[in-house]
C-alpha cells in the first residue's frame, strides 16, 4: 500500500506572488534612485547609537512580512554603508559597482546555479569570461583560470600553484612536513600587499618564508637586491620558489619591473606571479597600458574586477599560463563528484579543480553583462580618466603652498598631507590624522591613510567611475579648511 502524503508541503516561496513582485519592484526603484541621487548624499555617516541598539535583535524564530523587513532595512541598514558607491569615495582600493553589475548579481542569484562546473550555460559564460580576461592582460589563449572572490584569494591561488610546480618534491603528498626538506622562500618588495603574509601563514610556509625586498625611490622593487637575496638564500641551503611582482602597489600605485623579475625567475628557475589586484587593468587604458608592461610574461596573475573593473563585490580572477598547473594543484577525485559521459555531469568539477571552492556562484554573469553593456573601450577610457584625475590632484597639491606630496604619482594614487612646516614630525602626523577623520565625519569625502617614511599621508585612490574633477577641488578645499580650523583652536 502506498503511504498517504501529509496535507501540507512547507516551502519558502511567497503565498502571494503579486505582493512580493510589488515589493521587489519597489526595492529596485529605490536602489536606482539612490544611484541617481548619490551626489546629494553624504559619502559616509556615523551609525547612531539607537540604530546600533535596534539592530542588535534576538534570533527571529518567526517570520515577518517582507514589507516590514524592507522598511527596517531602509531605515536602519541602507543609510550606513562604507560609502564606496559615492563619487567622492577614494579610500583603500574600493570601487562603486554599477546599475548593470547590481542587476546581473540579482539575475545570477535568481538563477542560482552551482559553478563547480557541469554542462550548463553558466559554465560556458565563466569559461568565456576567463578567456576574455586572459586576452585583456595579454595571457596566451592556452592559459587557464577561474573567477574567485577577491585579490587575496586570486593571489593565494597563484602562490599555491607556484609552490606545487616549483617545490621540487610532491608537496601535495608530503606537505611541509617531509623530513630534511629545504625551507621554501618567496620574494616580493616591502610594498607587497599583506595578502602575502596571510598566504604564507596559511600554506604552512610561515611568515618568514616571505623575503621582503627593499624598494627604490619610486616604491618599486629593487631588482638587484632581490637577486642578491635569492643568491644568499640558495647559498644558505634554502629553496627559493616564487617571485612576486606587483603592478600597482596598494600604498602608492607603484609598478615593479616585471621584465627584470622575469629574467631573474628564468635564471633561477622560479615561478613569477604578478599581483595586479587593481593595476593589471591599466592595460585597458589607451595611453597608460605601458604601465602594465611585462605582466603578460608571468606564470600566473591575480587581479580584481571589483576594483578597476568597477563591478560590485566580490569578483576577481587568477590566470595561469600553463593551465594544467591549477589542476595539478587542486584536483581531488571522489565518487560523488565524478563526471559522466553525457548529461549534466559532464565536466562536473571543471572549475572546482582549479581552486579551493567546490560550491561556487555565478559571478561570471556580471563580468559578461558589464563588459557587453559598457564595452571594454569605455571601461578603459574611465581607467584613463582616473589616472588623469590623479595627475590633476597631484598638480593641485604641488601648486598649494600648505600641501606636500608624499610619494610619486605613478598611476591613480595620490599621497599627500597638510604641511605646516613649523610643526614637528609627530604633530604633523596627528594634525593630518585629525584632518582625515573630519573630512570623513563631515561626509565630504572618504580618502584613507597610510604612513610613508614615517609621514602620515592622506591617500586618495581613484578607482571611481563617478568622480568628477570638481570633486577633487572640493577635497583640497576641505582639507585646507579643516586644517585651518584645527590650527585656530
Ligand atoms: C595590490 C593589492 N593586492 C591585493 C589586494 C587584496 O585584494 P582583495 O581586497 O580583493 O582581497 C589589494 C587590495 O587592495 C591590493 O591593493
Image (cartoon, grey):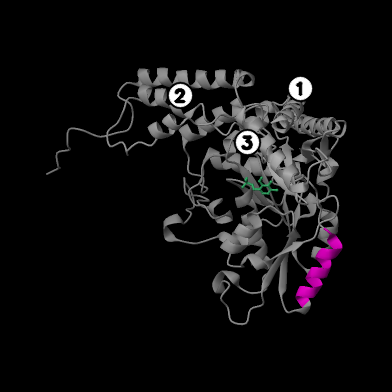
Name the spot of residue 378 as percent of width and height, x first. Answer: 75, 28
Report, in whole angstroms, how far the alpha carbon at label 2 lies from the one at label 3. 28 Å
Classed neighbour count for the residue bearing mark 2: other residues with Cα under 10 Å, few (<14), some (14–19), many (≥20): some
Residue corresponding to mark 2 = 74
The question of residue 243 being in magenta is answered with no
Q: Nearer the viewer, residue 147 or 422?
A: 422
Q: What label does residue 367 carry, if any?
A: 3
Answer with left or right where residue 213 lies relative to residue 22: right
Residue corresponding to mark 1 = 470
**Tag 1–tag 2 contact (CB < 8 Å):** no
| Label 3 beta carbon less than 8 Å to ligand 1 | no
Q: Work out whether 137 lies above or below 443.
A: below
**Main secondary structure type of the part rendered in magenta:** helix
Disc with the residue nearer the chain's start (1 vs 2): 2
Q: Which residues are magenta?
A: 222-234
Name the spot of residue 194 as percent of width and height, x first. Answer: 65, 54
Report, in whole angstroms, how far the alpha carbon at label 3 lies from the one at label 1. 30 Å
**Tag 3–tag 1 contact (CB < 8 Å):** no
Asked which secondary structure carries label 3, the reply is helix
Residue 261 visible? The answer is yes
Report, in whole angstroms, how far the alpha carbon at label 1 lies from the one at label 2. 30 Å
Name the spot of residue 223 as percent of width and height, x first. Answer: 84, 60
Asked which secondary structure carries label 1, the reply is helix
Disc with the residue nearer the chain's start (2 vs 3): 2
Asked which secondary structure carries label 2, the reply is helix
Q: Name the residue at 81% across, 56% down.
A: 215
Amino acid at each position: 500500500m502506498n503511504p498517504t502524503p501529509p496535507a501540507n508541503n512547507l516551502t519558502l516561496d511567497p503565498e502571494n506572488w503579486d505582493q512580493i513582485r510589488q515589493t521587489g519592484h519597489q526595492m529596485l526603484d529605490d536602489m536606482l534612485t539612490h544611484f541617481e541621487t548619490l551626489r546629494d548624499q553624504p559619502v559616509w555617516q556615523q551609525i547612531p547609537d539607537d540604530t546600533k541598539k535596534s539592530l542588535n535583535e534576538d534570533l527571529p524564530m518567526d517570520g515577518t512580512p517582507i514589507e516590514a523587513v524592507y522598511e527596517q532595512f531602509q531605515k536602519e541598514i541602507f543609510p550606513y554603508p562604507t560609502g564606496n558607491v559615492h563619487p567622492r569615495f577614494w579610500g583603500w582600493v574600493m570601487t562603486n559597482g554599477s546599475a548593470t553589475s547590481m542587476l546581473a548579481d540579482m539575475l545570477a542569484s535568481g538563477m542560482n546555479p552551482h559553478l563547480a562546473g557541469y554542462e550548463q550555460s553558466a559554465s560556458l559564460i565563466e569559461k568565456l569570461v576567463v578567456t576574455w580576461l586572459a586576452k585583456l592582460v595579454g595571457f596566451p589563449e592556452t592559459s587557464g583560470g577561474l573567477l574567485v572572490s577577491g585579490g587575496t584569494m586570486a593571489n593565494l591561488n597563484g602562490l599555491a600553484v607556484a609552490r606545487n610546480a616549483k617545490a621540487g618534491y610532491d608537496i601535495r603528498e608530503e606537505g611541509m612536513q617531509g623530513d630534511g626538506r629545504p625551507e621554501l622562500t618567496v620574494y616580493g618588495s616591502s610594498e607587497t600587499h599583506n595578502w602575502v603574509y596571510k598566504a604564507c601563514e596559511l600554506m604552512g610556509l610561515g611568515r618568514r618564508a616571505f623575503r621582503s625586498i627593499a624598494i627604490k625611490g619610486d616604491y618599486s622593487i629593487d631588482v638587484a637586491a632581490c637577486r642578491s637575496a635569492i643568491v644568499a638564500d640558495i647559498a644558505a641551503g634554502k629553496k627559493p620558489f616564487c617571485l612576486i611582482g606587483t603592478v600597482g602597489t596598494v600604498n602608492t600605485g607603484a609598478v615593479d619591473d616585471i621584465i627584470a623579475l622575469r629574467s631573474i625567475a628564468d635564471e633561477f628557475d622560479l615561478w613569477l606571479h604578478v599581483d595586479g589586484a587593481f593595476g593589471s587593468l591599466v592595460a585597458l587604458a589607451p595611453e597608460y597600458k605601458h604601465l602594465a608592461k611585462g605582466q603578460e610574461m608571468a606564470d600566473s596573475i591575480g587581479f580584481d574586477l571589483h576594483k578597476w573593473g568597477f563591478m560590485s563585490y566580490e569578483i576577481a580572477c587568477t590566470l595561469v599560463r600553463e593551465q594544467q598547473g591549477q589542476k595539478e594543484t587542486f584536483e581531488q577525485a571522489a565518487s560523488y563528484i565524478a563526471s559522466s559521459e553525457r548529461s549534466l555531469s559532464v565536466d562536473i568539477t571543471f572549475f572546482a579543480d582549479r581552486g579551493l571552492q567546490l560550491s561556487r556562484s555565478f559571478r561570471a554573469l556580471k563580468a559578461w553583462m558589464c563588459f557587453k553593456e559598457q564595452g571594454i573601450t569605455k571601461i578603459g577610457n574611465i581607467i584613463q580618466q582616473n589616472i588623469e584625475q590623479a595627475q590633476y590632484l597631484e598638480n593641485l597639491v604641488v601648486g598649494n603652498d600648505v600641501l606636500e606630496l608624499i610619494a610619486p604619482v605613478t598611476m591613480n594614487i595620490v599621497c599627500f598631507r597638510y604641511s605646516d612646516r613649523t610643526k614637528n614630525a609627530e604633530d604633523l602626523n596627528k594634525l593630518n590624522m585629525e584632518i582625515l577623520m573630519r573630512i570623513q565625519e563631515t561626509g565630504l569625502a572618504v580618502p584613507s591613510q597610510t604612513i610613508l617614511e614615517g609621514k602620515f599621508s592622506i591617500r586618495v585612490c581613484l578607482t571611481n567611475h563617478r568622480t568628477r574633477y570638481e570633486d577633487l577641488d572640493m577635497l583640497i578645499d576641505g582639507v585646507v579648511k579643516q586644517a585651518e580650523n584645527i590650527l585656530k583652536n
